[in-house]
Amino acid sequence: MEFIKKHYEKLVLIVLLFAFIGSMFYVLNIIRETAENKGLAISTGKADQIALNGKDKIFNSDFLVKDNLGKWNQSAQRNSNFANMTSDLVIPLELSFCPFEDCGNMIPFGYMSGKNCPFCGKLLPKPPKRRVSRFRRTEEDLDGDGIPNREEENQKLDPQDPYDALYDRDRDGFSNVYEYMNGYKMHLAKSHPPMWHRLVLKELGRQKLPVIFKAVNTNNSPDQKRWDIQINHMNPRDMTVLRTTDVTSLGGLLTIDNREYQIARIELRQTKLPTKEGESQRMKDESIIYLEETGGKDRISMQIGKDVFSSDVKAVFIDHGMIDKEGKPAQFIVGLKQKLTVGNRRNARETYLLHTIDTKRNMALLVDAKTEKIPEKVEEQMWVTQKGHIPEDMRIRPVQKITETVEGENMPENIPGGRRR
């Protein structure tokens, strides 16, 4: 024990030396075994890159276009039924969002025309009409409504309100901006453009008249003068709404479309319908009455329950200067050589005569009802077209919400038409 105590450090070193030598032999044995195993050989394979010449023709743009010019397919619409719902890679597709809160998915804008949302399946409403303004915001016209700031302040309008330009301050049927742009005073009712500027030609043709031959009652008498004839007068703006009922007889007078007619003849066409036992007798009535204009040459025939049309071509005018509470403009049906009065007592009426109807060009020529003469200068002639004389973005507007695009911005619109500010 005494020996171990004196030499224990040396003994520890000897033990560590033998452990080191043993580990070296172990490592050398592993290296030897690994060198003898020749089965694990990794192949490098072939190179996956090749060197190309930058001057080669495949890098020449002129060569590529010339060589492939005939291979390019012309861009064409794939299916007319999906014109607003598909797009080529280079043609942007107009998109929208489903307005229903439980959906809100992005969909092609073409679906917003009475189709169902492809996600929630609900019927999509038709969006309001977008209107593009011709005016821009400047320092002189902060709201971009076409009326300078100084002029708006003088007329007690709001230079920050872009919609007051479409007010009708003096109630003459013309918007503030249209009167300003044409040199008239927007605050004086007697200062206004010609009244016919308010008119737009809606259509030309034989017009449906607001009357219906409803029934004839012979009163069991062969004498036609004792027969009762029922005529229903409908609302001209809504032919489904009954306005008045008139019971008359042969020789009676009727006022239709501002003309007076007399019932000249009755053609009775009543036939019995086959009935089953126990059923009451039914009649099929296809009787016709013939009307003649008093003091004129116009003739009209009316069959029971059938629509009645004018015998001559008429013009339907829309007056955008006269708008009702529902926002609908007034409508006038005028025949050739008939008169049309535009305006009111406030701004003095102007009466015109429909002189010419041009069905090929969809135009109607008005003349002064007093002179009935056509001005020699073309620029002074009163031709009314389907586009109208007043630009659409300068017409007075009723209170409504529509979408307006001004210099690329979408803005709500609330334009009261025909009332003072």
Image (tube, rainbow, N blue to C red):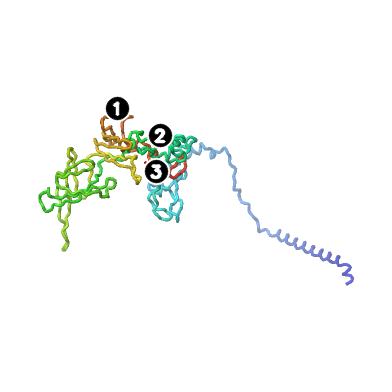
Answer above or below: position of 247 versus 11: above
Against 110, is 194 above or below?
A: above
Give, as a three-letter code, the residue at label 1. Answer: Glu
Of the pair 316 and 13, the residue shown nearer to us? 316
What residue sits right under mark 2 in the picture?
180
Question: Which amino acid does the dot numbered 2 rest on?
Answer: Tyr
Q: Residue 416: which numbered mark, if any?
A: 3
* CA distance for labels 2 and 1: 28 Å
User: Percent x, y for residue 195?
Assistant: 32, 35
Of callouts 2 and 1, the N-terminal one: 2
Q: Do the residues labelled 1 and 3 touch (CB within 8 Å)?
A: no
Taking the image as drawn, is residue 178 in sight? no
Nearer mark to the viewer, of 2 and 1: 2
Q: Judge from the rendering whether residue 49 lies leftward or rightward of residue 296; answer left or right.
A: right
- Assign a secondary structure to mark 3: loop
The residue type indicated by label 3 comes to Pro
Query: Which element type, helix, strand or loop, lies under badge 2?
Result: helix
Residue placed under numbered mark 1 in the picture: 376
The quarter of the picture where the C terminus appears is: top left
**Quadrant of the image containing the N terminus:** bottom right
Q: Is mark 1 on a helix, strand or loop?
A: loop
